[in-house]
Amino acid sequence: MIHSLTSALVCLLLFASANVFAEDALRPNILWLVSEDHGPHMGCYGDAYATTPNVDALAAKGLLYTHCWSNAPVCAPARTTLIAGMYAPSTGGQHMRSMVPYPRGKKMYPQFLREAGYYCTNNAKEDYNVEKPGKVWDDSSRKGHWKNRGEGQPFFAIFNSGRSHESQIRKRPHKAVHDPAQAPVPAYHPDTKEVRRDWAQYYDVVSLADADAGARLRELEEAGLTNDTIVFYYADHGSGMPRNKRWPCNAGLHVPLVVYIPEKFKHLRSEDYVAGGKTDRLVSFVDFAPTLLSLVGIRPPEWMQGHAFLGEHAAEPQPYLYGFRGRMDERIDMVRSVTDGRYVYVRNYMPHRIYGQHLNYMWQTPTTPVWERLHQQGKLTPEQDFFWNPKPAEELYDLENDPDEVHNLADSLEHHDVLERLRKAQRDLALKIRDVGFLPEGEMHARSQGTTPYDMARDTGKYPLERIMATAELASNLEPEATSALVKAFEDGDSAVRYWAAMGLLMRGKDAVAVGHGSLVSALADPSPYVRIVAAEALGRYGQPSDRALAIKVLADHADWSDHDVFTAMSALNALDEFPDDVAAIKSKLSGKNGDAPHGRYEKYVPRLVGDRDN
């Protein structure tokens, strides 16, 4: 009897094990090959100047996506969107190299996969702007590799190549492979030897990233796993060249995406999947996490804001892709964008801040200082000079007829309906995801004490988004007739509304500041430091002669990091750069001592601003 029971138990265990192994055998391995800082400048995308044989070969047997956006035009917020399946302005992770707590009760996508039995590795860049909610990866390091998984265990593995990063464009000495004389120079860049050299070197380093991808694909083939593995190749945002990286138009957001799904897993392909084909389906980084879950048979949770485009739980194609720009290193800005695949709409909420704000890292690329110098000398075309001037409130570009995005159609009567449609799409998304970018960065942290920005934003008492956003739109539309309503908004009980009221007068300049003079003077004593700083900048730049000394004193007081937190100091230092005759003397008197910051990732920005070239 005992022997029979033992035999039955052994058979049952063997049967269960066999089912587990059979189930694992039916689940795909997934390999993500990621490169940094490059757009679809590859042979498979029709770029004859590019040399990318490995990704071209992958595209020849896989599916190429013609419209993929990274959502953010810089690495950390783009990767934050990827790992969460939520837009970074929803989680509070939209600012470059920031750090916020992760939304309560939510997971990062590798945690779902690990729970389902996958071995998950990341080799090796993370760069998230959100804190990890527990153990995310089995191994996230330079040693991370699918080879280290358990026997028969399916894997998800990322390998990141940094060889095409922005820093490699300016690395010298460099032996040119692509001929600078043949380099394609977009209409927004001046055609100089420095610009051509940088563009040629950019194509050289994209070839190196392609070679890294080829090495990983050969490794997979040599292990006999090609037919068991779904492969993605993509870049983390657009080209590292200035006015691509950090710029939330197509040039900064459009990335290559090639997906190969073996015949064995053809049931996971989408209807538009044709081996060696292309699809115009609109996809973006926010869609990658739900797509990954769908490919392994997990229904994406409703809180994920993206839509699966492959697998068992693929959703319907979406009509739009969305982009965003927040603080870029030490420089403050707020831009949102949307595309339907042909047109790109850009909403500038801080149009008085030029795209070409001085940013230490970007100025290390030779193109940038040459381009700026030509602007100062008045030697640029209007298309080239746009980068160095205040932005319009809205931009609209037709990618079909204007791929370089240099002809703004926002005022075109012929395109009015397109503008209205994309404007509404941008506004609708901001409301749907509870975009926290309408708060000054420090205010977002202050209101989130004891919770997270994501959860705070869903408490309308803490974050009356509709009212704040309406004031931000009124402020940044630059219409003179909005001035009286902005002055009235100084009476609002929410500091973010008052902040945007002050911003609206600042953006409009002298006449609006004269109308709102009394409100701006009163705002110098506002409980919010961000309202005080904007009011001081407005009065100092456009107020009465007697206002200037007081405004400069307010800004100088707030710029000292030893007396204020990092966000207040950054805001004041950004404002002070609009006072070139005073800024050097003020910066020389700052204590230089570090003050409060919520995380070490913020600590380099104030020193950069204090030590900026104007000092």
Image: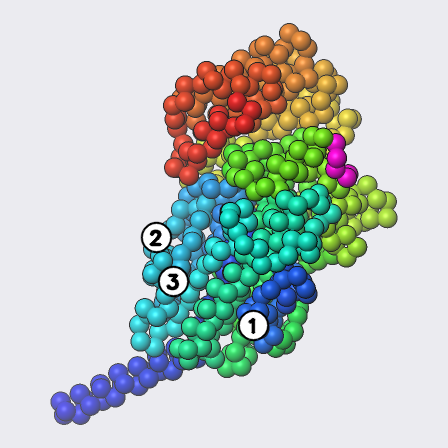
Q: CA distance from mark 1 to mark 2?
A: 35 Å
Q: Nearer the viewer, residue 394 or 243?
A: 243
Q: How many marks?
A: 3
Query: Residue at 67% of width from left, 14% of height from top?
Result: 543
Q: Is residue 357 above or below residue 217?
A: above
Q: Is residue 287 visible?
A: no
Instruction: Give the amino acid at mark 2.
Output: Gly
Residue that lies at the very extreme toward the top in this rendered image: 546
Badge 3 element: strand
| Percent position of residue 32, x then y | 48, 64
Give the magenta range: 378-382
Q: Which residue is mark 1?
A: 58
Q: Which mark is residue 343?
A: none
Q: Is residue 492 left or right of residue 188?
A: left
Query: What kind of colouring is applied to the model shown?
Result: rainbow
Q: Position of residue 397 (x, y in %)?
A: 75, 49
The amino acid type found where label 1 is placed reads Leu
Q: Secondary structure at mark 2?
A: loop
Residue 565 falls in image quadrant = top left
What residue did someone put label 2 on? 134
Q: Residues within 10 Å of mark 3 (few under 14, many from 20)?
A: many
- Circle number at residue 121: 3
Please identify the quadrant where the N terminus is shown: bottom left
Label 1 packing within 10 angstroms: few (<14), some (14-19), many (20+): many
Position above or below: 339 against 347: below
